Every structure is written in C-alpha cells, then in structure tokens.
Image: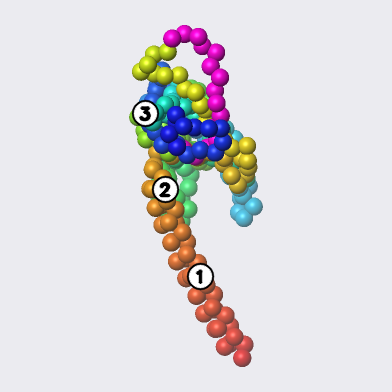
Amino acid sequence: TAIKDLQEGTVEVKGTAQTRGPLLESPVTRSPCVCYALFLNETIGSGKGSYSHTFFHEVKSASFVVNDETGCATIKTDDLVWKSGKTKQIALQAHQHTLSFNQSGLIKSISSSLGTQHGQHADLPAELYQELGGDYLSHCDNLNEVHLKDGDPLYIQGYARRMHSGSTEQQDPSEPEPQWQIGASPKKSRWNTGIWVSIKSEEKMMATSYRIFKYGWAIGLFLSGLLIILLVICNFILN
C-alpha cells in the first residue's frame, strides 16, 4: 500500500529508512544506525530444566521515517519487542550480531552454523562496559544486537494509526511531516507479534519461508520413515 493511500488498520508498506536527525551508534558493533535493539540473556538452571532469560533489553531510535516517494510514516519501535517464554525478541529482521560466551562442543557447532559468533566478555567494547557495568555483563551468556541503517529498504507489516500534528510552522517540502505511525496490531499476543519490519523484500521472505517449510517437511518425512523402521524391527523381535 502506498503511504499516501493508507487508512487506519492492518497495512503492508514498502519504503526506505530515512533519517531526520543525528544517527545513533549501536552498542556492540558501533555501527551508525537509525534504530537498534540490544538483548542480554542468561541461562537459568542446568540440564533439562534450564531456560534462557532476558535480564536486560534496550531499544533506541533516532528521528527517522519510512519513505516510499508518495509520503512518509513513522514506526513505533517500542512495539517491535515481544516476549516468548522468559526471553524477549524483536520483530525486526535487519543487521544482526549475535555473540555467545562459554559454549563448547556440539552446542557451539550448531549455533555457529546459524550465524552465532563466540567470544569472551573481555572482547566487548569498552563503551558497553561503561554504559552497563562489568558485573552486569558478567551474567550474560548470550548477547543479541539488531540495528537498522539509514537508507535500508524496508518491508513492513503492521497497524497504521493517523498522527495528529500540533505544528503550525510551514513544512519543508523535501522533508514532509509524517501523517501516519505504524505500530503493532491490537491483536498482538505471545504468538502474534502484531508488527514485522524487515530489510528483505516480501518475495525474499516468502522464499525463505518456503525453504524452511521444505527442509522441515524433509526432516519430518525422514523421522517418520525412521519410526516405521523401528516399529517393524521391534515387532519382528517380539514375534
């Protein structure tokens, strides 16, 4: 939907992130950005009863809009955070940096294949220690940073609400004031993020979903076949 044609309700918008002020610096990779999210997780317990818990998260954004040449809108970045169990996630698929500490063996190999890097707490930027403190960071088993850059292409699914401007000043034609804000749907829940923002196009996201479905189907077929073989073997042994 073109931004100029938006109406209140569920929308899909394609545009570009456009800064309207000074850029931020992401806390871990120290990258210039218009928005970033940082999550610190720790493992509670051990063995089968263990679980991951987000004990700190932060979302910050500079002044920026999404522009599609027909108009511009803002994104309610606080709505991007959602909770899954004891951990918090962000409904933003952008530039991601995941770092795990003190993992070894099979878990390290699996997480590395998924793009997770491994290191020591001492490898973290000194600025992050100054902001959060060493004692705080020492509890962290897994760190996740996601940031959005100025000029990134955006594909957004969310809920549009009209903004009411109180400004009476003449607007700069090159930077029109946004009339809409895109946030989470009122139906947001544990299983429904209510909003999704990605630097990938809708077509690329659908292709990724298809690959995941295809691999999941293949794995399910393999496990079903394995189960049938085991049942046949057990039946043969018992008879």
Q: Which residues are magenta?
A: 156-170
Query: Disc 2 marks which residue?
Result: 205
Q: Identify which amino acid the numbered label 3 is placed on.
A: Glu
Which mark is drawn over residue 69? 3
For marks 2 and 3 on the same chain, the one whose residue lies earlier in the sequence: 3
Q: Identify which amino acid the numbered label 2 is placed on.
A: Met
Task: Choose mark 2 or mark 3, whichever is in front.
Answer: 3
How crowded is the residue under tag 2: few (<14 C-alpha within 10 Å), some, or many (20+)? some
Q: Identify which amino acid the numbered label 1 is placed on.
A: Leu
At mark 3, the secondary structure is loop
Q: Nearer the viewer, residue 159 or 41?
A: 159
Is 224 on the left or on the right of 172, as rendered? right
Q: Nearer the viewer, residue 15 or 70?
A: 70
Query: In which quadrant of the rendered image does the N terminus lie?
Result: top left
| Residue 113 drawn at (x, y percent) | 40, 52
Query: Disc 1 marks which residue?
Result: 223
